Amino acid sequence: MTDTNAAPATNANMEALLSAIARLPTPVFAFTGNGELRPLNRSAIELAELEGLSRYLRHRTTPHPLTSILQNTLDAPGTSSEMHAEFPSGRRYAIEASMRSDKGSGRWLLVLIRHAGTRNPDAIRQIAAGLGLTPREIEIVILMVAGRSSTELCTELSIARNTLKSHLASLFSKTGCHNRTQLVARFFEP
């Protein structure tokens, strides 16, 4: 059955798709038919660096929890659900992979990985107190840990994008973090 609404696969369409993926705040990976885990956006690259995710998960001496989740997805065609795993760092993540293609396990999967759950706002305030964060910065951190995008933060806090950028620059300076992924991870430390 062919989807008549699907856009034809042209180079321009592929470039547009990859550009859209690159702008997502959620880490997006491709899991190739030969078992490679490829980061598709900046957030995925940052998460791979933070968690030590190598391109070839299957060849690790110590099995990574992500390997079994992806293998289970490949082994069970027609199913896709959010799964949770604790990575070797102790951080918990929610992992969602696209369904396996009916054309076989040699096809790629798209994999989204995000922090699982949220940390109690009171715990965040306690950590933030030792860092000298302002009440507004704490509010931003709480919302970021809850998974809000920049657009959602600006709307929810009624602030301009440049104001958010200023707050983030201050947060990075005070916490020693270099990006949002590191900042959120700091408040998820076990």
Image (cartoon, rainbow, N blue to C red):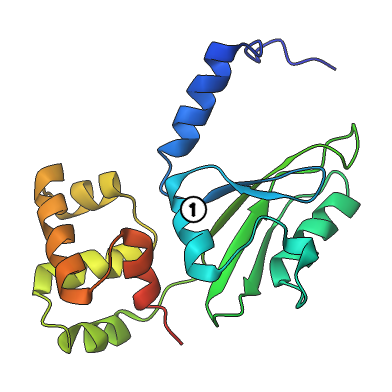
Find residue 140 and report its image quarter: bottom left
Q: Residues within 10 Å of mark 1 (few under 14, many from 20)?
A: some
153 relative to 18 in the view: left or right: left
Q: How many numbered discs?
A: 1
Look at mark 1 in the image and give the residue it sits on. 45
Residue 136 location (% of width, % of height): 11, 67
Q: Quadrant of the N terminus?
A: top right
48 relative to 107 in the view: left or right: left
Residue 21 location (% of width, % of height): 49, 36
Question: Compared to 17, does 5 lie above or below?
Answer: above
Can residue 160 be spotted in the picture? no
Residue for point 10% across, 55% down: 166
Q: Secondary structure at mark 1?
A: helix
Residue 178 location (% of width, % of height): 28, 63
Find residue 77 and report its image quarter: top right
Residue for point 18% across, 73% down: 138
Can residue 96 be spotted in the picture? yes
Question: Label 1 sits on what residue type?
Answer: Ile
Question: Compared to 108, does 51 lie above or below?
Answer: below
82 relative to 73 in the view: left or right: left
Residue 104 location (% of width, % of height): 91, 37
Residue for point 10% across, 82% down: 132
Question: Compared to 35, does 14 lie above or below?
Answer: above
